């Protein structure tokens, strides 16, 4: 019988809440396929606490470079603030490691293209954490929509209406273009509209607005967009950190049914609801029921998908063109909001100010030193 592949050697960069609370349980759930061998953090106390929590012989390092030189891991998980993602991802790729990085993968399309060049040179891959794609409910919905079973998608709504207070923005890197890349469009709603793009495919045109209504930040605290998809569907997208009643929601009205997902930070099968159109065939609609296996959306599910791709020798999901498309959508939303003009897919490239920074050097939005 063929031998199963040996366990991949994994290192984590950043040992804060997202790594300890989400990445570590994912690694533990896949302990038959991965081995955590190293952790990096500039905060020694936080690093020590993580190593104790990990419960394994995990080597500790104060810098990414020192860890990569000493350990040469197969896979690097990155959970640091966004401004560090590009540099750390490129360093890991150059060392021959695959990367699974927290969102956003980087702060601009220009930074993404740096990562793509490092991928091509190394032969390794960099994926971004968009765990909402990987639950069984999302997989089932995408299959139904892509197959045409629900009829043509016509109208969609996507909302991430959350609440963040002043204490949240007291963390120095939050709310600043240079360290976070943007407001809720980049840091919060990106999960939900990534899932919308995953379900509906390529977008064609974006019109948008953004504002600072409450928080004293460089970036926005709310944005809204109107989106036309290449297949014809029209959608609204709302990203807010001003909403006392928090919810994450997607609704897609297709010709034969409406599919709805309502949750907050993660979903299971029961969070998906299918409502047949009045003319829908009852027997056909009965087949739309959610699958028996219930796999919640999670870092665990996405890590499993990455490892499956690795075993097959193929590009992992959430990398390459998929990752770039979501980042391009964010750039287009900002450009449309700040210029007041519609933005079409593919128009933001080198030479466009929104290619290098999400604020596009707009005088009303860019940091004063950038204008």
Image (tube, rainbow, N blue to C red):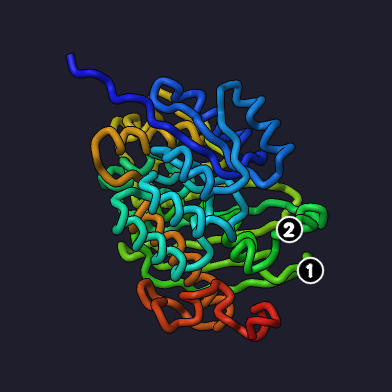
Residue 279 visible at all: no
Q: Picture quarter containing residue 2?
A: top left
Q: Give the camera-side residue of 44 and 366.
A: 44
- The residue located at (45%, 22%) in the rendering is 31
How many numbered circles are shown?
2
Q: Picture quarter containing residue 83?
A: bottom right
- The residue located at (38%, 41%) in the rendering is 141
Q: Give the camera-side residue of 12 and 126.
A: 12
Q: Give the camera-side residue of 221 and 358.
A: 358
In the picture, the quarter occupied by the N terminus is: top left
Residue 331 at x, y percent in the picture: 49, 70
Q: Earlier along the polypeptide chain: callout 2 or callout 1?
A: 1
The residue wearing badge 1 is 216
Residue 64 vs 84, above or below: the answer is above
Residue 124 at x, y percent in the picture: 33, 48
- The residue located at (53%, 64%) in the rendering is 107
Q: Judge from the rendering whether residue 143 lies leftward or rightward of residue 82; answer left or right.
A: left
Residue 32 at x, y percent in the picture: 40, 20
Q: Sort mark 1 into few (<14), some (14-19) or many (20+) by Cα contacts within 10 Å.
A: few
Residue 283 vs 65, above or below: the answer is above
* Alpha-carbon span between mark 2 and mark 1: 13 Å
Element type at marker 1? loop
The residue wearing badge 2 is 242
Residue 108 visible at all: yes
Q: Judge from the rendering whether residue 89 lies leftward or rightward of residue 3; answer left or right.
A: right
Q: Give the camera-side residue of 184 and 122.
A: 122
Element type at marker 2? strand
In the picture, the quarter occupied by the C terminus is: bottom right
């Amino acid at each position: 019988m063929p031998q199963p592949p040996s366990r991949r050697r994994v290192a984590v960069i950043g040992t804060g809440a997202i790594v300890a609370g989400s990445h570590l349980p994912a690694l533990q759930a896949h302990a038959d396929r991965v081995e955590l061998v190293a952790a990096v953090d500039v905060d020694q106390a936080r690093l020590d606490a993580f190593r104790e929590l990990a419960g394994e012989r995990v080597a500790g390092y104060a810098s990414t470079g020192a860890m990569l030189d000493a350990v040469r891991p197969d896979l690097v998980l990155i959970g640091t603030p966004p401004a560090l993602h590009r540099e750390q991802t490129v360093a890991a790729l150059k060392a021959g490691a695959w990367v699974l990085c927290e969102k956003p993968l980087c702060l601009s399309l220009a930074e993404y293209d740096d990562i793509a060049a490092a991928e091509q040179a190394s032969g390794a891959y960099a994926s971004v954490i968009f765990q909402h794609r990987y639950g069984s409910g999302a997989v089932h919905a995408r299959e139904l929509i892509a197959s045409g079973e629900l009829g043509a998608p016509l109208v969609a709504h996507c909302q991430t209406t959350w609440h963040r207070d002043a204490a949240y923005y007291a963390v120095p890197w939050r709310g600043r273009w240079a360290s976070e890349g943007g407001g809720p469009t980049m840091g919060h709603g990106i999960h939900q509209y990534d899932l919308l793009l995953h379900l509906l495919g390529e977008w064609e045109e974006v019109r948008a607005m953004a504002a600072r209504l409450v928080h004293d930040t460089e970036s926005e605290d709310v944005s809204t967009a109107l989106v036309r998809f290449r297949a014809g569907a029209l959608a609204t997208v709302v990203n807010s950190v001003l909403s006392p009643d928090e919810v994450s929601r997607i609704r897609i009205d297709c010709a034969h049914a409406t599919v709805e997902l309502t949750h907050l930070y993660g979903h299971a099968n029961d969070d998906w609801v299918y409502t047949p159109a009045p003319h829908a065939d009852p027997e056909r609609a009965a087949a739309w029921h959610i699958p028996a296996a219930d796999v919640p959306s999670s870092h665990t599910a996405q890590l499993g998908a990455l490892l499956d791709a690795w075993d097959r020798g193929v590009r992992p999901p959430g990398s390459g063109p998929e990752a770039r498309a979501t980042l391009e959508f964010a750039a287009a939303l900002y450009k449309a909001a700040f210029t007041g003009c519609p933005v079409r897919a593919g128009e933001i490239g080198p030479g466009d100010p929104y290619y290098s920074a999400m604020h596009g050097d707009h005088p009303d939005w860019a940091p004063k030193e950038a204008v």
